[in-house]
Image: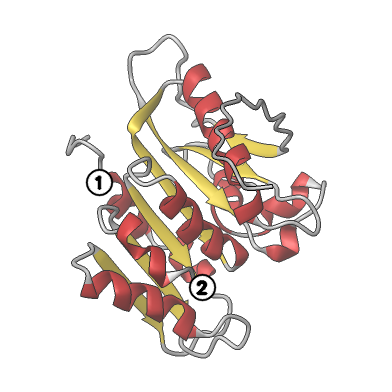
C-alpha cells in the first residue's frame, strides 16, 4: 500500500503543575499603576525535588529572602526530581504568564537567569522563546550553539569560573563565541580563581541588577 499525504490539526491542552517561590517587594501596591520588573530564576540540580526550602540555598531567592525590599518581582520555580529545565519549558512560561496576569508586572522587563543546570536552562529557554526576555544572565551553564540565531537579539551576560571542574568553562565559551561571531550583544565575565560556585559573586554584585534594568524590549528606561 502506498503512502498518502495527511494532515492533523488538533488542539492539545497540557496540565502544568509546578511549585515555586514568589517574591513581591515590600513596597509593592496592588492598586498602584507602577509596573515592576520581573526576574525568573532557575536553580541548579541540587535543589530539585519537592522541598521549596532547597530553592533558597543560592541566588535570587536567597537574596529576596534576606531583603524584602529587593526591587524586582521574582519567580523561583522548583524543578522536579530527576527532571531538567529543558523538559519544563512550557510550565515555566505558563508560570510567567500567570504572574504577569495577576500582578503589576512590566512585560517589557522580563529577565532570566540561572546557575549550573539553571544556566543551561537559561540558554535553552531564551532560545525557545526569543523576544520574551529583555536580558538573560546564564551562570556556569551551556547550550546549543547551533541555536544561537534565536539569541542574537537578546542582551546576554554570561559568567563562569575558570577552574570549574563540574561544568567546564568551554560550555559557556562556545555560546559566547558563537554569539560574538554572529553579532550578538554579549558580555562574558570569567572568575580566574573560581571553581563551580561562580554564582555567589555574581548575584552579590549590584551591577548585575543595574544591567538588567538597563534593558527593555522596547527601549524604555526607569
Say if 211 sits above or below 159 in the image: above
- Colour scheme of this structure image? secondary structure
Q: Would you say 37 lies left or right of 153 here? A: right
- Asked whether 72 or 39 is in front, the reply is 39
Residue for point 52% across, 39% down: 74
Residue for point 61% across, 65% down: 117
- Asked whether 140 or 132 is in front, the reply is 132
For the C terminus, the quadrant is top left
Pinpoint residue 47: horizontal percent, then vertical percent.
Answer: 73, 58
Residue for point 53% across, 68% down: 200
* Mark 2 residue crowding within 10 angstroms, few (<14) / some (14–19) / many (20+): many
Disc 2 to disc 1, how far (Cα)?
A: 22 Å
* Mark 1 residue crowding within 10 angstroms, few (<14) / some (14–19) / many (20+): many
Residue for point 42% across, 89% down: 192
Say if 74 sits above or below 190 in the image: above
Q: Would you say 81 lies left or right of 222 here? A: right
Mark 2 lies on residue:
140
Q: Would you say 162 lies left or right of 21 here? A: left
**Mark 2 in CB contact with mark 1 (< 8 angstroms):** no
For label 1, the SS is loop
For label 2, the SS is loop
Pinpoint residue 131: horizontal percent, then vertical percent.
Answer: 32, 43
Give residue 32's quadrant in the image: top left
Number of numbered discs visible in the structure rendering: 2
Q: Which mark is residue 117?
A: none
Q: Earlier in the sequence, mark 2 or mark 1?
A: 2
Q: Would you say 149 lies left or right of 14 here? A: left
Q: Which mark is residue 215?
A: 1
Amino acid at each position: 500500500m502506498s503512502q498518502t499525504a495527511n494532515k492533523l490539526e488538533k488542539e492539545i491542552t497540557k496540565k502544568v503543575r509546578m511549585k515555586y517561590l514568589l517574591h513581591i517587594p515590600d513596597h509593592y501596591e496592588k492598586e498602584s499603576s507602577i509596573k515592576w520588573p520581573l526576574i525568573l530564576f532557575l536553580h541548579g540540580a541540587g535543589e530539585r525535588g519537592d522541598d521549596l526550602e532547597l530553592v533558597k540555598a543560592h541566588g535570587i531567592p536567597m537574596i529576596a529572602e534576606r531583603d524584602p525590599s529587593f526591587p524586582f518581582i521574582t519567580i523561583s520555580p522548583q524543578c522536579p526530581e530527576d527532571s531538567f529545565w529543558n523538559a519544563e519549558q512550557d510550565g515555566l512560561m505558563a508560570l510567567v504568564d500567570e504572574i504577569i496576569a495577576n500582578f503589576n508586572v512590566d512585560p517589557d522587563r522580563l529577565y532570566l537567569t540561572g546557575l549550573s543546570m539553571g544556566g543551561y536552562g537559561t540558554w535553552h529557554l531564551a532560545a525557545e522563546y526569543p523576544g520574551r526576555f529583555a536580558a538573560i544572565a546564564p551562570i556556569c551553564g551551556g547550550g546549543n550553539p547551533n541555536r544561537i540565531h534565536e539569541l542574537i537579539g537578546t542582551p546576554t551576560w554570561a559568567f563562569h569560573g575558570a577552574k570549574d571542574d563540574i561544568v567546564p568553562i568551554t560550555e559557556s565559551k562556545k555560546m559566547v563565541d558563537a554569539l560574538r561571531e554572529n553579532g550578538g550583544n554579549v558580555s562574558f565575565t570569567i572568575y580566574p580563581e573560581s571553581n563551580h560556585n561562580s554564582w555567589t559573586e555574581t548575584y552579590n554584585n549590584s551591577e548585575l541588577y543595574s544591567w538588567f534594568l538597563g534593558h527593555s524590549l522596547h527601549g524604555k528606561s526607569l
